[in-house]
Image (tube, helix red, strand yellow):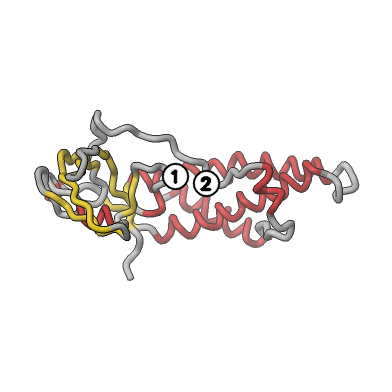
Amino acid sequence: MGRPFITREGYDQLHKELDYLWNEKRPEVTQKVAWAASLGDRSENADYHYNKRLLAQIDRRIRYLRHCLNDLQVITYNPQQAGKVFFGAYVEIEADADGQLLQVRIVGGDEIFGRTNYISVDAPMAKALLGKQEGDDAVVHTPKGDKIWYVNQISYEKPDWFEEQPIVDQIMKTDEDLENENDKTEILSPEEQKKIEEEYLKSQLS
């Protein structure tokens, strides 16, 4: 099985997130955990437990990003793609049944970031659109039956008709979510921290 695809923008966003978590967010939360722990009894220390769980969430995300960035294959635009739907394309489609319009971008699964108008290249909709030209119809197979969509517009640069949605935070959870998590969630060991730091610094030189 080949390496997962990602656009250059998606790769840069993941790297930006890793930079932020490692250089800013983790040190900030680590300091809060240390401060809360210094207050004494931890059993009823809400600040300690909340930030400890948040730190565990950050560490899990750092682990994921470290492995993810090493494994992904960046796909850039090739002029031969012009006029057809391929990876990285912005596409406007129209439903045959009711004229509904949708604007989507076909990307890798790791760069959707919670945006509903970004779809994975492995999704049924994306598979149906790949290789199509403007004016073509695409049949999307769904559990509720087949649906026909017409390809109206294709672009590989962000077009005016595509509305960019905000990126959803991948680690921040509500207080209730954090309170419900097991207190034994693993935090990075000193050895893991050192390894990640070495790989992080190496990535800055590449």
Most distant residue in the right direction: 40
Label 2: which secondary element: loop
Residue 139 visible here: yes
Question: Distance of mark 1 from mark 2, alpha carbons?
Answer: 8 Å
Q: Is 14 situated left or right of 121 in this image?
A: right
Q: Can you give x and y, in whole percent of width and height, for residue 96 in the image? A: 17, 45
Most distant residue in the bottom direction: 1
* Residue identified by numbered label 2: 170
Which residue is rendered at x = 26% and y = 53% of the image?
126
Which numbered mark, 1 or 2, is in the foreground of this view? 1
Residue 93 visible here: no
Q: Can you give x and y, in whole percent of width and height, for residue 177 in the image? A: 65, 48
Amino acid carrying mark 2 in the image: Gln
Question: Few, some or many C-alpha atoms within 10 Å of disc 1 (few <14, some 14-19, many ≥20)?
Answer: some
Image quadrant where residue 185 sits = bottom right
Q: Is 48 situated left or right of 177 in this image?
A: right
Question: Quick check: marks 1 and 2 in contact, CB under 8 Å?
Answer: yes
Q: Can you give x and y, in whole percent of width and height, for residue 75 in the image? A: 28, 52
Label 1: which secondary element: loop
* Residue identified by numbered label 1: 114
Which residue is rendered at x = 63% and y = 42% of the image?
174
